[in-house]
Image (cartoon, rainbow, N blue to C red):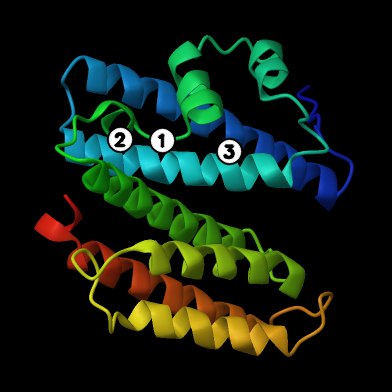
Amino acid sequence: MEVKVNLWNDKREREMYESFADLYGIIKTTEKLEKAYVRDLVSSSDYESECLKLIAQFKTLSSSLRDAVPSIERFAEAYRMDCPAALNRLLVSGVPATVEHRSFSSTANATSAAAVAECVQHFITAMDSLKLNMVAVDQVHPLLVDLSSSLAKLGTGILPSDFEGKAKMREWIARLAKMGAADELTEQQARQLLFDLESSYSAFMAALPNGGS
């Protein structure tokens, strides 16, 4: 006779274990991506794009699990994860190897590349947070402020001065500023904000030199 054993006692515990599984998956995927890049099995542009997504997702998830997982290293050890490259990329470096080791012709180019990487991370962090139902004003507002600030750092040589995404973020920041910190976005507002973020992110990547590649 088969006996079903639940790892959780309630919805909150179930969501926590699901988040553990997501964190495990992100670390494992990053390790495989790092190895694929070193072995030249993935192009630099594809590697950088995917690595930026994983880093942003990791930051969002590890932040939400701060109380349950105070140490990522211990989490990896507890689940017997042999992922040194991933832990270095996610915890130590914080940027793709292409950004970390790229040779630039000038300091200005290095600054621009770092600013683009920062924007991508803020876009993905904001989108993933909404997908994780983090819709309180004091959760959403700082993410949009960080994104807006990072977009403002980009010169007109990289991003048009009339880039619509900047205006959309300013509008949302102004709207949230009129709400209380504990207030939450309605389902319709959260859906609209996610749509604006996704459309702005697509436009951002398309506006980059070489279409973000």
Q: Is residue 169 above or below residue 145?
A: below
Would you identify the image quadrant in which residue 161 lies?
bottom left
In this rendering, position of residue 35 left or right of residue 61: left
Circle nearer the N terminus (3, 2): 3
Q: Which residue is mark 1?
A: 95
Question: Real-space Cα distance between discs 3 and 2?
Answer: 25 Å
- Counting the numbered discs, the total is 3
| Type of amino acid under label 2 | Val
Q: Secondary structure at mark 1?
A: loop
| CB-based contact (under 8 Å), mark 3 and mark 1 | no
Question: Real-space Cα distance between discs 2 and 1?
Answer: 6 Å
| Type of amino acid under label 3 | Asp
Q: Is residue 89 above or below residue 16?
A: above
Q: Secondary structure at mark 2?
A: helix
From the top left corner, tell me how far across and down residue 190 is, in percent. 60, 78
| Front tag of 3 and 2 | 2
Q: Residue 105 versus residue 27: which sits nearer the camera?
A: 105
Crowding at mark 3 (Cα within 10 Å: few <14, some 14-19, many 20+)? some
Q: Which residue is mark 2?
A: 99
Would you identify the image quadrant in which residue 155 lies?
bottom left
Q: Secondary structure at mark 3?
A: helix
Circle nearer the N terminus (3, 1): 3
Tell me, for residue 86, which label it has, or none. none
